[in-house]
Each structure stands twice: as C-alpha cells, then as structure tokens.
Amino acid sequence: MISTLLVANRGEIACRIFRTCRELGIRTVAVHSDPDANALHARVADAAVRLPGAAPADTYLDAGLIVKAAVAAGADAVHPGYGFLSENADFARAVLDAGLVWVGPPPEAIEAMASKTRAKELMGLAPLGEVTEADLPVLVKAAAGGGGRGMRVVRHLDDLDTALQSARSEAASAFGDGEVFVEPYVENGRHVEVQILADTHGTVWPLGTRDCSLQRRHQKVVEESPAPGLPEPLTDELHTLAVRAARAVDYVGAGTVEFLVAGDQAHFLEMNTRLQVEHPVTEAVFGLDLVAEQFRIAEGHALPDAPPRARGHAVEARLYAEDPARDWAPQTGALHRFAVPDSVRLDTGFTDGDEIGVHYDPMLAKLVAHAPTRAEAIRKLAAALEQSTIHGPLTNRDLLVASLRHDEFTSARMDTGFYDRHLTDLTEPTPDPCAPLAAALADAHDRSRFGGWRNVPSQPQVKRYTMAGEETEVRYRHTRAGGLEADGVRVVHADARLVVLEVDGVRRSYEVARYGDEIHANTTRLTALPRFPDPTAQHAPGSLLAPMPGTVVRVADGVTAGAAVRAGEPLLWLEAMKMEHKITAPVSGTLSALNAVPGQQVTVGSLLAVVQNTP
C-alpha cells in the first residue's frame, strides 16, 4: 500500500501526479534543484527535498541523490514522471534496492526498450550501418531518452558528421547518455502511437491511438486521440504490435509504443517505458486516470479483462515559452499572470509570478479539450488558447491557435512535415493595429491628472512600441474636457486597465496590463520604447547577439577571427533549456570578431561575433 510518494521529477508532471495523490490520500514529496526552490511543484507537495545545484546532471539526473531524498523524507514509493531518469533501469534498481516501491515497469523491461537500438533488434529491426547517398535522407537519433532531443535530419552526406556530433552532445546533456544511431527518415509520415497499460497478472490493455504529427524539432506540439482517419485494419495492427512489444519484455505499468505511419504501412519507432506528456488525451477519451492506474498496478491490483469504452475526441496543445518565428528560440523571464478558461483541462508547473529560467524545458503547460467530436474539440481548444491570459515572455500561443484552425489540420491531412511547409505562413505577424493605441491611452490615463491638456495648440502626444518584431508609433491628444482623442478612432473609454475603442462603428475592448516596459493589450504583447534611444545599445551591422541566455557549448572547427565564412554557415552552438541552438553567419564575409568560447555563460543580447559583409 502506497502511503507516501516521492516524484523524481519537476514541473507540470510532478504537479499532475501530486493532484492524483491528493485525490487518493497519498502524502507527497517533491525534489527540487536550486533554481526550482520556489517552483510550483516544490510548493504544492507535502514535503520537499533540495538537490543542490542547477544542472540536470547534478540534480534530477543524480539517481543516488534522489534515492537518498526518498529515504530521508520517509517515502515508501517513487514515481519517475517522464524525462530525466524515467527510463533509467539503474535508477529503478536503486529504488527497489532501497526497499521502496517503484511505480513503473521492471528494470529489465526498461533496459530492453530504453535503448532504441536494442528495442529495434527486439522487434526484428536494425539501424543503418554505413550511410551512403542512396540512404538519404536519414535521421540521427539518441538511443536513450526522447522529447526530440538528440535528433537531427540529414539530407546531405557532408552534414552527417556535424549532425552526429551535435546529437551526441545534446543527448549526453539531456539524458546522461550520448549514444546515437542512424535510421531512414520517412518523409511526410504521421506519428501515431498506442498507449498501453499492463498489470502483473498478464493483462495488457491497448488504449486506442494518438496522433502526434504536429512537431517542432521532432518534439510534439499538438496531440489527439483517437488518431483520425486510420483504417480499422491498420488500427487493429497497431494495437497488436503494441501488445506484442509489451509482452515481449513482460511489461508492467503505463507505456507507449510509437510508430511512423505512411499510407497503410506502420513502421515501429520505439517503446517509451514511461508515462507520456500527451497521456491526458487518452485519459479524457477513456475516462481514466492513468497515474491512479499506475499506483494500483504497483500495489498488485489486477486490471479488468477489458478497458473502458472510448468516448468522444480529445486534443492537447503544448504551450511553450518560445519564439517559433526565430527557430523556436526559448524565452525566459517572469510569468506575471497566467490564467486559462475552465472549459479545458490545464496541466502546468507554473503560476502567477513564477520565473521561467534557462535550465529546463520551456514548456509552460498543456491544455486539453474533450468533446463528442473532433471538430468540437479542436474549436474548443483553439478558443481556450485565444482567451487565455499569458503575461510574460513570448509564447507559441498564436502559432497553436493558427495550427488548430489550419485546413490541413482540421481536415486531418497533417503529417510530421506540417511545420516545414507552413511555419512561415503560420508565424506571419497579424498585429492588432489598435493595440498600441490602447496601450498608449491606458498609460496616458494617469498622466492626464497632471495637466496633459494645454490651452495653446500643440503637437500630439507620441508613443513608440515594438510589436511582432516591428517598431510602431501612435499619436493621441488630450481634450479640453479632460478626455483623450485619436485620429480615426473614437475613444469610448480609457483608464489604466481598460480601453474601449470604436473604429468604423465597431467597438472593441482592450484589457491592458503593464510590467515595466512590457505591455499586454488583450493577447498582443508590446514593448515600450524610450523617447530618446540609447546610443550605447547600437551594434555594428553583422553583429550576432545571443538570442537567449545559455552556455556556449562549442565553436565550429576552423572558425576564428579573420576567417572567411559563408551565409548560413554554422559558427557556434548555444545550449539552453536542454537543447542546442545553432548560431549561423547572417551573410557571407569575414568574421571580424569572435567573442565566444566553449563553456562561456551568455545573457540575452550578448555580442557573440561580428561578420562583415563581403561586397
């Protein structure tokens, strides 16, 4: 009987497991690194144990430290969550050797499937050996872990060595294992998976299918259940293969078998021996709590002979602090306000006032909508995202809304190349032209008490902002009656928090919030610009500035000051939020300055290098 549980993880998965624990009367213990000392998962647990340090290798990837924390806190069970040590057989053994209950599959099953190379061998498959031009395109893939880390698509043979080196480095950082392999890359396939649940009495449930084809950097962004449009024979085949994989390793607990589907052909990818980020869509469709089922299985209870009947459709979107238009660059800073409509399920590890740091994955939350039909679920989720209040760093919210409403997605014709084809169009700015005026009028409201209007005609008040990466300027005037006016717009109401404008007979309201120079007018994010720009903030043409805080992990071979470089050539790599980000030459020319060295910590806007254009 589990009475006290330690979750060997962080963020939204730890909070989600704690929620089930509270419902079941199980006492909870969190572990946290130093940057996570005030994180939501550490605050909501009944007890929390510090893991000294910041880097994952020193904290959430230190199996011995976590087992010691569980013993010290009096836990009698450990749940690994997902990511970090969730697919580490040695960690599972260490938990069992300490006399604790392991809420997961047997170490032997993890060992058999945690390495994708060994899993393929078990399923009668093998990775590619020596790669030739005829094999292209290929996918370099980390043997351990998941979440898109340690994966690179290679379309030119000359890029293979660089891709292997980069993937190894990223995999070692994220999973503590730098092993990678190469397999054929299937263009325009669908990523489809089967959730399984297995007990210790020989029962294995295949819990429908999930489609996870909308991906960036091979990491899922939108998931749904059931996978739409699959022929019944193909669905049956996927279920059969998933159950076969589970039985092959005497699997116990919750797991996922993943496939790439091209036409009516299913290609085995891997088996994840853990809970998946997208498990809520399966829970919604089957009316289950998979975490609660994991606890029951760990306590020895048997599953019924058959799973519950599937009902309706569920869609999940992952909300990230990132800029999709700038190569998905992660964003950091204070999350001032975060609120989501009650119409959808919210799994998150953040709340108002939390800081989004550089050490971990930039996912803020998962929003899940369930409805009788797919069309209704999609509409419900898109509306909830649009109505959410997210004040803080830039997120992928607008991209998610646009993706959910894209014809290729709504008609279920999507595949894993969706963002390769549509990202530019989906991230094309569609700024609200009245948002800057609303921001300016809200800011001017309090100032009007200090004599904004003058008896002598004068120039209008001018405010400058950046919005969607572009600079914009608005003008307004104070009236004799103490109000505000702007050309072409009727100001119905204006105070510091609410502005109502009427344009061509259409009235719209704007909720405005300001945090220093950062302003939010409804869903539009603006940055107020100073009246007189700081000349010291200017950089020479060709300057490469750090797009995020992080660590310089390596500089490309042969790249030194004075070297000739080509436009698009990789110069160096930054690591932030457990992923590598490539910095390339903006133009062909001469590298006149290189200020970055491996191991160097940089902040946003740090000058990394300067490339002088060659005429």
Image: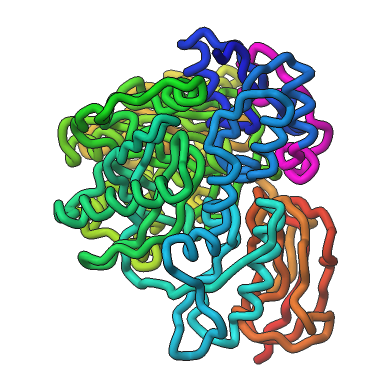
Left or right: 332 with respect to 116?
right
User: Can you give x and y, in whole percent of width and height, for residue 264 in the image?
Assistant: 21, 65
Residue drawn 76% across the image and 20% down it:
71
Can residue 59 be seen in this snapshot?
yes
Left or right: 20 with respect to 34?
left
Can residue 496 be seen in this snapshot?
no
User: Can you give x and y, in whole percent of width and height, for residue 465 in the image?
Assistant: 55, 46
Q: What are the residue bounds of the magenta stretch?
A: 38-63
From the viewer's side, name the closer residue of 492 and 91.
Answer: 91
- 584 shown above or below 373: below
Tally of marks: 0
From the viewer's side, name the closer residue of 459 and 556.
Answer: 556
Res. 171 image quadrant: bottom right
- 247 shown above or below 8: below
The image quadrant where one finds the C terminus is bottom right
- 593 shown above or below 335: below
The magenta stretch spans residue 336: no
Residue drawn 66% across the image and 76% down it:
570
User: Can you give x and y, in whole percent of width and height, for residue 450 in the image?
Assistant: 61, 20
The magenta stretch spans residue 55: yes
The image quadrant where one finds the N terminus is top right
Q: How is the image coloured?
A: rainbow
User: Can you give x and y, in whole percent of width and height, for residue 599 in the image?
Assistant: 84, 59
Left or right: 453 with respect to 196?
right
From the viewer's side, name the closer residue of 133 and 38.
Answer: 133
Identity of the residue furthest to the front in this view: 201
Residue drawn 79% across the image and 30% down it:
51
Residue drawn 67% across the image and 23% down it:
100
From the viewer's side, name the closer residue of 527 and 523.
Answer: 523
